Amino acid sequence: MGSGARVYHRRMADIPRIELNDGNSIPQLGYGVFQVPPEETERHVSRALEIGYRHIDTAAIYGNEEGVGRAIASSGIPRDELFITTKLWNDRHEGEEPRAATEESLERLGLEQVDLYLVHWPTPRRSNHVQAWTSLVGLRDAGLARSIGVSNFEPEHLDDILAATGVVPAVNQVELHPAHGQRAVKEWCARHGARVEAWGPLGQGKYDLFGEPAVAEAAAAHGITPAQAVIRWHLQHGHIVFPKSVREERLRENLEVFDFALDDAEVAAIDALDPLDGTGRVGSSPYDVH
């Protein structure tokens, strides 16, 4: 192992863990495999694990759980050092489908239990998000998932599942970046003790966040890249974040965010990039997915 690898493993040990409301904890920085082709997933996840990542986020609909599983199996890393997330897709919310879908995901991943299982979307047109959440509570109690949560849930959907079950999600994973700050979702989660995870944390290319003066000036002040400045902004807000990349140099760069901090003025300037009217959203609205 070269000196560079030792540096990155050391820095991995510095990644903070965020305490969840069920007593478990999650590494605050991880690696997401959304849109990573299935035939390439094993290679990219293996590289991420070699570099030092231990938190991997996938989903049934991504079609690459098997590649994640092969990378885990060949890594030699003890299971208790890994944190694996996957998600229940929209057409599996009712009846026995959540249990069957979970078991299928576990088989593809080669695991007996995932660390975090999420309802992928609330699918309000089907009005079955409460059924899905109720099933996840049972799957957690059966030991198939250590923690359970949701993805893309708005406050009204969160209110629904809390009223029905009394169980607060450990995590709500939502599109979140400087141009779409999700303040209402964050306020709900803070009030009820759920943690917020950011997908699309760098803006997904719709906005030139890296060219925004607030980001560019923070990066220049600290001698870092704009991407590192945005990731650091997430970390200082307490978000769990898992940027996606298939480039080794970017994977390494994304870990190099723990030896500096943005000052309050820099954080506030990046906060101000959110138009607050919802127009900063890049991905689908939860109300449009069914």
Image: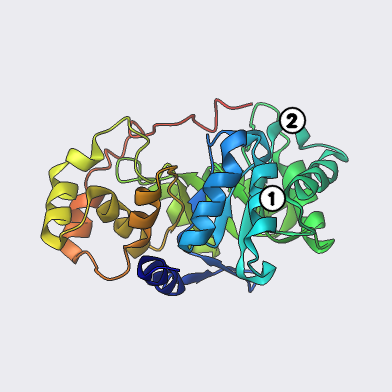
- Amino acid type, label 2: Asp
Q: Please give the name of the residue rendered at 66% of the width and 70% of the height, measured from the top-left corner.
A: 78
Quadrant in which residue 234 is drawn: bottom left
Mark number, residue 69: 1
Residue 130 in the figure: left or right of residue 255: right
- Where is residue 193? Give x, y as percent: 54, 65
Q: Please give the name of the residue rendered at 40% of the width and 63% of the height, measured from the top-left corner.
A: 238
- Where is residue 211? Give x, y as percent: 17, 39
- Mark 1 residue element: helix
Q: How many marks?
A: 2
Residue ID for mark 2: 91
Up-down: is 89 above or below 213?
above
Classify 10 Å Cα crowding around label 2: few (below 14), some (14-19), many (20 and above): few
Q: Please give the name of the residue rendered at 40% of the width and 45% of the height, measured from the top-left corner.
A: 176
Quadrant for the C terminus in the image: top right
- Mark 2 residue element: helix
- Where is residue 110? Give x, y as percent: 76, 53
Residue 150 in the figure: left or right of residue 277: right
Q: Please give the name of the residue rendered at 30% of the width and 40% of the height, measured from the top-left corner.
A: 179
Query: Is residue 237 among what the camera can see?
Result: no
